[in-house]
Image (tube, helix red, strand yellow):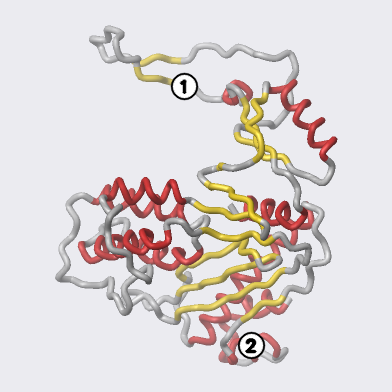
């Protein structure tokens, strides 16, 4: 999804038109290497409960393009004539159906304004609230209750765990346009295996928060001043069960958020400085990938990238070329981030 955010952010800054297309019968253009079985359609007598097996495939074109499997397509660029030629070529090869300018893609609603492009998921959010019975719920102003404890041995385990997992899956999809949900969804996702009532209470609180922000999204600025800025932070020893810290970062291009994450760290950090430094290393890795991706898109001159951190000890370690015993166990993160 970060790739989609990048493309749309560049398009907003360049004021290009985004064309959307769909491939008719896209599955016919894929190579199939395994046997395919299908349940018998309803209405056909099937006393022995048999299934159907696909026996042969038919080529629908006398031309073949290697390594192509496509369905929903976005096309944009600086040359409208080339874009038109590409659309015609794809139509000849795959029978493309033009859907006009982009307004809905992969569950994302795309709106245009004088300031740029707005990405939202209002329709999906309303459907989620309606299915969960929270369409008329009273909104709250925080994704999770303050000082909420998710470790309570007295809280009963849920008998219907599938509902909890389904709600978390849908909320995870909403993080594509809501960075403010990342930490809450990451926290609640830790209990998918065996959720308790207290975890479901957290999910219900998050649903009430969604009620208040259902119409919001992210703005991809229509500015031609493209520069990368990253912000990293950590919540030291946030998990009361494992005492692992949580990494959080957000990366912006031209003031537009294009990549963000909240994730529990894989090892225990002995200090807040160590946790902050591991968060910086995660952000640095994402920046490195984004720079390469943007260079493939023709966006250059983005280095050096400013990485913001509010921990003075971590900043001191980042600047100090001399390592000592207290940083030996995180030297890989130190060297990587400094490099």
Give the residue at mark 1: 36
Q: Nearer the viewer, residue 104 or 115?
A: 115
Q: Which of these two is toward me, 272 or 209?
A: 209
Crowdedness of circle 1 by 10 Å Cα count: few (<14), some, many (20+)? few
Q: In this view, does 46 lie above or below 199?
A: above
Q: Which of the pair 314/185 is nearer the observer?
A: 185
Residue in view at x 60 percent, y 75 percent:
231
Q: Position of residue 243 (x, y in %)?
A: 38, 78
Q: Report the side of 145 relative to 30 (left or right).
A: left
What distance separates the C-alpha of mark 1 from that of mark 2? Answer: 56 Å
Q: Where is residue 325 in the image (x, y as percent from the top left)?
A: 58, 91
Say what secondary structure mark 2 lies in: helix
Q: Position of residue 138 (x, y in %)?
A: 28, 63
For label 2, the crowd category at 10 Å Cα-Cα, with few meaning under 14, some 14 to 19 and many 20 or more, is: some
Image position of 49 with respect to 332: above or below: above
When the figure is inspected, residue 179 is found, relative to residue 64, above or below; the finding is below
Query: Viewer-nearest of labels 1 and 2?
Result: 2
In what quadrant of the picture does the C terminus appear? bottom right
For marks 1 and 2, the one nearer the N-term is: 1
Q: How many marks?
A: 2
Residue that numbered label 2 is attached to: 315
């Amino acid at each position: 999804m970060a790739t989609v955010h990048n493309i749309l952010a560049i398009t907003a800054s360049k004021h290009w038109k985004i064309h959307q297309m769909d491939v008719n019968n896209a599955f016919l253009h894929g190579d199939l290497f395994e046997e395919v079985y299908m349940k018998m359609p309803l209405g056909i007598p099937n006393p022995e409960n048999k299934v159907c097996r696909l026996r042969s495939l038919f080529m629908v074109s006398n031309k073949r393009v290697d390594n192509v499997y496509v369905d929903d397509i976005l096309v944009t660029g600086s040359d409208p004539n080339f874009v038109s030629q590409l659309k015609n070529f794809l139509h000849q090869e795959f029978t493309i159906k033009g859907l006009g300018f982009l307004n809905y893609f992969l569950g994302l609603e795309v709106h245009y304004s004088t300031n740029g492009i707005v990405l939202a998921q209002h329709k999906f959010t309303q459907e989620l609230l309606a299915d969960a019975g929270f369409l008329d719920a009273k909104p709250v102003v925080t994704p999770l209750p303050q000082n909420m404890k998710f470790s309570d041995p007295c809280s009963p385990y849920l008998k219907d765990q599938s509902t909890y997992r389904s709600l978390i899956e849908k909320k995870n999809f909403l993080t594509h346009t809501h960075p403010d949900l990342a930490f809450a969804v990451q926290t609640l996702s830790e209990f998918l295996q065996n959720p308790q009532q207290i975890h479901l209470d957290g999910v219900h609180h998050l649903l009430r928060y969604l009620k208040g922000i259902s119409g919001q999204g992210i703005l991809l600025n229509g500015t031609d001043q493209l520069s990368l800025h990253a912000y990293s932070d950590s919540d030291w020893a946030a998990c009361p069960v494992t005492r692992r810290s949580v990494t959080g970062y957000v990366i912006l291009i031209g003031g537009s958020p294009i990549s963000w994450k909240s994730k529990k760290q894989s090892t225990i950090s002995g200090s807040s400085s160590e946790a902050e430094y591991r968060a910086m290393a995660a952000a640095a890795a994402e920046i490195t990938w984004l720079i390469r991706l943007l260079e493939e898109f023709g966006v250059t001159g983005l280095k050096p990238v400013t990485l913001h951190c509010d921990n003075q000890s971590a900043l001191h370690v980042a600047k100090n070329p001399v390592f000592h015993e207290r940083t030996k166990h995180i030297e890989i993160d130190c060297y990587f981030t400094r490099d």
